[in-house]
Structure formats: C-alpha cells, structure tokens
Amino acid sequence: MDDIQVLVVDNSPVIRRILGYVLEAEGCCVQMAEDGLEALDCMAKQRPDILFTDLIMPKIDGEKLSYIVRNTPELKDIFLVVLSGVALEDNEITLRIGADVCIAKGPAGTMKEHVKAALERFRANQRGGGGAIQGMEGLYPREVTSELLISKKHREVILGRMAEGVVELNHAGRIVMANAAAIALIAQPEAQVLGSSLGQLLPPPACDRMTTWMAQLDDPAGFVPLVFSYDEPVPMGERLVTFNLVPVIEEATFFIIGILQDVSRRKMLEQRQRQLEKELQRVRKLEAMSLMASGISHDFNNLMTIISGNIEMARYVSRDENINQMLGEAAKALNLTMELIRQFTTFSDNYLPQKSQVRLRSLIDEVLSQGLSATGIDYRLQCSDDDLAMTVDPYLIRQVFVNLTKNAVDAMGKTGRIEVSIDRVDGDQEAARTGQSVPGGELVRIAFSDSGPGIAPTILDQVFDPYFSTKQKGAQKGMGLGLTIVHAIVKKHGGTVWIETSPAGGCTVRLYFPLQPAVVVDPRFFARKAMGRRILVMDDEEMMRLINKKMFEHFGCAVTLAVTGEEAIDLYRQHLADGKRFDLSLLDLRVIRGMGGLEAARAIVALDPEAALVAVSGDSGNEVMLQYGDHHFVAALAKPFSIDAVEEMVDRFL
Amino acid sequence: MRILVIDDDEQMRTLLRQVMEWAGYEVVEAGDGREGMQKQRKQPADLVITDLIMPEQEGLETITSLKKEYPDIKIIAISGGGRIGPEAYLPAAQELGADKVFSKPFDVRELAEAVKELLSHG
C-alpha cells in the first residue's frame, strides 16, 4: 500500500513539515493545506485516505472541518487524525469530533512516533480510537491558551443564540463560518453551507450585485460595505433577508463579516397595516360620498326632471332644425348626468336595497349578451348549478355586472373573451385557500375574467378607489366610479371582492356573496344600527303601517304590524311567551274601530312592566302626548314623523 | 279629459302642466294634498299626478283619500326620494292604489305615454 493519499491541514508550517517528512518516509503521497477551506478544496480534487488536521486554524477550523468530513457522504469514511494543540486545555472538543486518532501536539520526537502509530492503525483498519488522546505525557497546560479557548467558547455561545445571522466569508466570498441563525436563513445543511460561495446562494439580482461588489474589493479604495437594506431585502426561499456585508482588512488580504436579518415578519405586518389603512381610507371616502349622495340626490332628482322635461318640451314645440339639434345634444349630456347621479345614489347609505331572489346565471347571461352585442368579444358562462339563486337587490347586482362588463370591454378593445364561473362554496374554506377576508358560511363565488392586458400590480390596490381610472377621464369615458360602485354594492350585500391579475395578461375579478341574505352588514357602510331588533307597530291606517315598517326595516329591525289595540296586545302576549319580546312598540292613540293606544299600553304594561312603548298621534297637543311618562310610555311621536325621528328612536331605545 | 297635478314645487307643476296641455288635456294644479282634494271636489279630474313627499298632506295619504272618494280615478305617483330613497315609497304608493309610479328624474315623454295609456283604457 504505497500510495496512501494523505492530506495534512495545519496553519503552522513547522508542523506541516514534520508530518510531511514522516509520512513521505512511510511511503505516503502527501498533500498540504493551510486551513480548513483550503483543505475542502483539496479534498474536492482528490479524496484523501487519511486526513491529519489541526484544531485551531483560521477560516474553517479543525472542528468544523471534521464535522464537514463526517457529514458529507463522499468524505465520511476518511480516516481522521486530529492534531490538537489544546489537548490539555480543552480535551472535550478534541474528543467530541469523532476522530479515529487524537494526537496532542508536543515535542517533535513524540509526535513522530504517534503519527507512525496512527498510520499503523489506519493500515490495520482500527477505527474509532479517538476516545483517548495520544502524547499527553510531558505536556503542561498554558494559561493563554485556556483564556483563548474560553473566549472562543463564549463567542460561540453568543453567536449561536443570536437572532441575527452572522457569516464570515473569505476573500473570495466563500462561507467559512455561519451561526445557527444564518444556517436557518440559508436553509441548507451546515456541512454544505460551509465552503460554498454566498453569492451562489442568493437569487440572481442580489448575486450580480455581490459579484460586482466583490470585484471592486481588489482595490482598497473600494472597501465599502455591501448593504441589502430593509427597503430592498433579498428573498431567500419564503423569507426576506437584509444583508450587511463588511470587508475587514487582515494582513495582506481581507475577509468579510456578514450580518443577516430576517425581516419577513416585519414586512408582512407592515403590509397588513398598509392594507388596513388603505381599506380605511377607502371606507372614509365612501362615507363622505355616501353622505353627499344622500344629501343631494333628492334635490338633484327634482332639478334634473325639470331641466330634462323643459328640454323635451322645447324640442317638441320647436320647429327649428338647428335649435332641435342643440337641444338634442343638451338632452344627451343630461342623460349621462342623470345616469351618473343615479349611480351616485347607490353610495347613499339610505338607499334601501330591494331584495328578491335572483337567478344569477340568467342575470349575468343577459348583461353579457347585451353588453357585448356590438363587439367582437365572446363570452363563456359556466355555472355549477343553473338554478343557483341568491337574495339580493336585482338592480344593484345588475349594475355590478354591467360595470364589470364595461371595464372588460374597455380593456380588451375589439376582440377578446370573457369567462365567468359561478359556484357555491364554503366561506371558511375559501378564506383559508385564498388568504383573503372572505365571510364565513355558504357563499356564491363568481370569477369574472377577461383576456385584456391586465392591471399593473402597482395600481391593483387603487382600482376600487373613487375617481381612480386608467381610462381618459370625462363624462363619456367614465368617471372612475365603476369599480367603486361594484365595491360598495358587494359590501352592501355583505360580500367581498378583489382583483387578481397575471403577468401573462388578463384579470379576474373575484366576488363572493352570502347565499343567505346577510344578517350582519358592515356597519361602516350601513346605518343598520338596530339589526334584528323587534318592533311592534299598531296603527289603524294602512299607509302609516307601511311607512313605519319601511322606516324601521331600514335600520335593520324586524317589524310586526297590528291594526288595533286588541291585536297589539295579543301579538305582544304571544311574542312574550315565545321569548321574543318586542324591543319597542309604537301605539297609535286614536283607533277608529277598535282599542286605542292608551288602553293597549295599560294592558301591555300589565303583561310586561318593562315594555318600551311609544305613543303616536296626529294631535301633538293631546294630554297623553304631552304627559306620556304618566301613561306608561317612554316617548311620544307626533304624526307625520320623518325618518330622522325614527332614527332618534332607534338611537335612544335600541 | 282633466288632469290634476299635485306638487309642492312650482316649477315641476308648470312643467307637468305644459306637458299635459300639449298632450291635449285640461290641467288643474294644486300645491299639496289638501288643496288637491279641495280642487278635485270642485272640478273632478280623470287622472291625478301627485308627488309623494309634500309639506301639508303626504302623497300617500292623498292617494288613499282619492281612491276612497273616487274609486275609478287614475293615479300616477312621482317620488323624488327623500331620506329613505324613492324606492321605499313607490311600492307603498302602488299598494295604496297608484296605477303607475315614476321616480325622479324621469322622462316626460314616458309620463305622457303613461297618461295616454291609462286614460284610453279607462
């Protein structure tokens, strides 16, 4: 066995020379390396049969080198001989690393004998003898070495426990040390990380920057740190990591210390915060619009009617071609204005959705075939259940799909394709699948996709904002309210909507609606302050009953109607027995054919002393109305009363 | 054929009068429901166009009274909304006996059409 391949790793040239003599004399083929990193390169070229390694070395030390050898499949069977200069001071690390032979560094003569003995053990294939250290006799512990070892141990504990990743790179950018946090961030086994180039572990743009930076380090003037800051972190797997790489001059060369920080969590929280703020801003804008819409819609509707009516009349009366043409133009603009105002009133939180069962498939089919009739765009509508119906306001829901179709047509131009799919899904599952805030329970999911150019990701968040438009603005082109209206309508129905776009083009609007009418509606959009409260309205006038019902229902109340006092008492008794006590009862004092409110109030209070009763009368000067407190009532309402009065009741009692 | 126009807005009354006169009807105007009922008793109209929200007597009340006293009268109700929105009043108006309902803003030509149709079927 003359060609035993041996690698000797030691940063001391004296030791290398001694071992070289001995081993070559024994007929071995000897390679030399100054440190662990160089040793790794040697082993990559030529796998040795025996590795003699020092423990304390710069770059990758003997302990790490042994660790790599034992944890790399191609190297793990190498016969490992450790030469420890610190055997006396710290025999623990010397013994821990799984060497086949351990030799304490000492006088040259003694060491030679032990090296020869190690060779003998290799030839005899006697492995696992590293439990005892050879050559300890005649050695004395040195205090400086102990202190250095203690300091090293402390450093290792600190590095190991740090949240930040710390790496040391050699002058070529290869990793010679990485603490536990860094290994976790790189997400590869330590044995592979050590010795590899950090640049190679980074994604291309960061790798390129690092290569450029490394190149300029040849010139001492170029000694500046490389920073991937919080604003431009490096994506490593699923994490975002900041890097701060600092070059440190060391004698003729340099090394690099790198600090890595995982900022994914902070980034994620920040993004969530931004999303919340955006949503809040949008809600505020919508609230302002809604307030304005409620305020102006009544006056505007009146004025519009008069303007348009007079224009129509003038057209009818006039026989002059020119005048008629001008009036025709005015009428056209006016129609657009009216359409805009009509859309605007959708934001009004006083707009009362008229809910009825709507078959989605046929509604969407109709909107698409109408909206696309004059275009070269075709569409495909897929519905898992053709009879799928939900309780919504048909006018509003139609407006959602009219707006989406219009946007898609504007985005696609002359030709293209719209695909719509309608499914019934479980809200909780969808929320988990998509990571979006999808309401729970049974939902209708609608995906509305076009084959247009898609939306730039940078503006994806803004598309629902009022007056945000990618189109040229103007009354003819659209005011940038289309998607805002879609958003408002979906929210009014207790649903969710968002837009996805893919780099390949096209975008998909995802809409979710509760299959059952929404019980809880977002209070920010709706004045449903008294959702689910039970109201009893007793009035012998049908009209008053209807109006009262509408007004209380507007605030989300469940309204029960009675014509006379007798009927009111019966209903109250029944509800009380069923545990569905009325939260508020309005009793008309004057009932022509039957018991009036005052008598009914006495009977109801006898049933339920806590009953909240409101006296209602057209005669506000009535003694009961003035002194309602003395007659079992909590309030008095003079007819006719406005919705503001109802709202005040709701605020006070519900 | 006579038409009673009830609206608290003078401009709206003028417009409705002009439209109806051009369509060939005699028009009587009233500023609220109470005045409307008085005029109707003096000069009964075949059709009433009434606003729904007025200060003195609400349109819905007027519709109820009109139908009670004149079961054959045709009624068109117009609503401009108000705080609960036009859609809240119109179904109520229909339930109380309005033959046709319009929500402002509306097209006067459509209104004229509706009047013509109601009176010819009458």
Image (cartoon, rainbow, N blue to C red):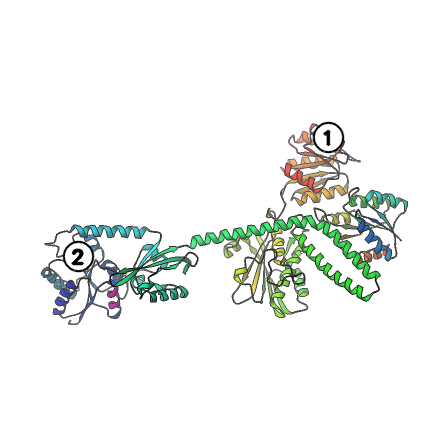
Residue A172 visible here? yes
- Magenta stretch bounds: A37-43
Give the left or right position of residue B8, taking residue A23 as reference.
Answer: right
Left or right, residue A485 beside residue A35: right
Which amino acid type is shown beneath numbered disc 2? Gly
Say if residue B72 shows up in the picture. Answer: no
Q: Amino acid at mark 1?
A: Leu
* Residue A162 part of the magenta segment: no
Badge 1: residue crowd in 10 Å (few <14, some 14–19, many ≥20):
few
Q: Residue furthest right?
A: B42
Residue matched to label 1: A626
Chain of the residue under the numbered disc 1 shown in the image: A
In this view, the residue farthest toward the front is: A221
Residue indicated by mark 2: A85
As drawn, A432 above or below A371: above
Residue A168 image offset from top left, x and y in percent: 30, 59
